[in-house]
Image: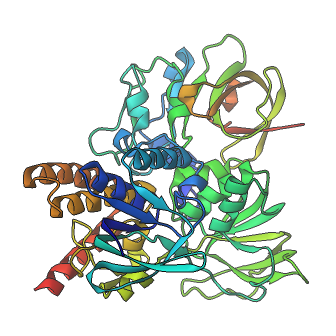
Amino acid sequence: MSEGLAVQGYISEQELRDAPGIPSALRRSRGPVAVIECIQPIPCNPCEASCRAEAISVGSDITALPRLDEDKCIGCYTCVPICPGQAIFVVDESLPGDQATIAMPYEFLPLPEEGEKVIALDRGGAELGEAEVARVQKSKRMNQTAMVTLNIPKGWTMRARAFRLTR
Amino acid sequence: MQRYELVCVGAGPAGLAGAIEAARYGAQVVVYDENERPGGQLFKQIHKFFGSREHRAGERGFDIGQSLLEQARELGVEVVLNATVLGIYEGGELQIRQEDTIFPVHGQKVLIATGASENMIPFPGWTLPGVIGAGAAQTMANLHGVRPGKRLLMVGAGNVGLVVSYQMLQAGCQVAAVIDAAPAIGGYGVHAAKVARQGVPFYMSQTVLQAHGADHVEGVTMARVDDKWQPVPGSEQSLEVDTICLAVGLNPMTQLCRMAHCQTVFVPALGGHVPAHDQNQETTVPGYYVAGDVSGIEEASSAIIQGRVAGLAVAHSLGYLSDEDFAAQQQEQLQSMRGLRHGPFGQARADGKELLARSVQEARQ
């Protein structure tokens, strides 16, 4: 065992390919869709309960992995701040041009401002480069987890998973 | 002497949940806690809980603690703080110390929910200021708003180490690394991933050799360990840190259980010596119950369910709950408990609990 979630602390490419919550490249190109990076059987199912499109299923055994039905997912962003493990992102590769967006949960202060330039980080915290904050959302239902949407190059949608402020 | 139908020792999630459940059906309940604030560890838990809606998944520990306190208050549960239970004797007698006064109370039933203490690992320099437990780090940052250090090393990659590493990042500390002597991360991957994506490296099969510094921690030397847990010569590396945070496991606080002559069993998966108990949470001493980490290390959601199960059993045995109602309510809680212990992360704990239940049966025969 030299790589992967249980050793490095983040999901390897192979683990990502095997996960039941990852939408196909084709689906990602069609519009916003959830990317569920939950690959261990832990007892948890708020994602399933939060999905009004019934696109996420866990089932009665709550340790089962969440399964994404990519055709049912409407890319509504509801599950992103709900996941207690901060393991769900929404990517949108359907925009014209090279740019895409990624929405991620964020629990640090200060919050970034819309339009601010930040440094996008990958799953291991390595810098990918500059990204722009498109939206910062908070609501009571999100229970103090903010959701930050970044404008990023299309090539980063399956890599960028965090960011750091430059100020 | 003051008399109660149920005396709970510990106002954490298990003790409060037990008190609430027993009081809900009419029992007269008191809860003693040696701390100045109730809630046990719940008010330090600023992360969202896992589980299902019935486990209050997605809610944060301090909110769950607040609602337990409110329920207890509404039901007339007496919560006495700064009150240390010095002893538990036969027949439901307890001695309580509050400031300079020591007084006896009598409980027809007793629920011991004393929680756990943190394990520590000794190494040269471990008494230097700056070597702290993960619980202390949480107390400083999450209760008192004090940053424990500028740059810290987390020792232990179980759920406590992972959750506290993330909380230290939230508090504005740099986390230099998370290390563990085990070859793999023991806690949930999602907790690790939140820390890793902030750029924190994980070093497995790694141990602390020494903390450096004259009058406080200024650095640490670590080394890789082989499959016999021995440091590998030549693998040493040093980090500049001012804080070394130890999250190397928890141990059930069974002193009062032992004093009450509750039989204990050694179950490593549950944190060490644990009082044997049946599915009512009742120990080998009739009328004495345990719940929460003292009955085996798990987490707050499990502690709440165990507290409820004990509270239901108390209400039933006091005659406040009919056999049918008790059976139905208990089944619901046990079902919810099974959900949390299912899967590879919970199997060893589920097996441990079965062993404890068998031990009670044997002791009673």
Colour scheme used in the picture? rainbow
Q: Where is residue A47 in the image (x, y as percent from the top left)?
A: 43, 34
Q: Where is residue B263 in the image (x, y as percent from the top left)?
A: 29, 86
> In the displayed structure, would residue A34 be above or below residue B102?
above
Residue nearest the observer in this picture, A164 or B70: B70
- Which quarter of the picture shows residue A91? top right
Q: Where is residue B83 in the image (x, y as percent from the top left)?
A: 52, 71
Q: Position of residue B212 (x, y in %)?
A: 85, 81
Residue drawn at the location 42% of the way across and 42% of the way down = B56
Residue B344 visible: no
Residue B19 visible: yes
In the displayed structure, does residue B198 sit left or right of residue B325? right
Residue nearest the observer in this picture, B14 or B53: B14
Residue drawn at the location 42% of the way across and 63% of the way down = B31
Residue nearest the observer in this picture, A46 or B75: B75
In the displayed structure, does residue B46 sit left or right of residue A156? left
Q: Which residue lies furthest to the front in this view?
A: B1
- Which quarter of the picture shows residue B255? bottom left
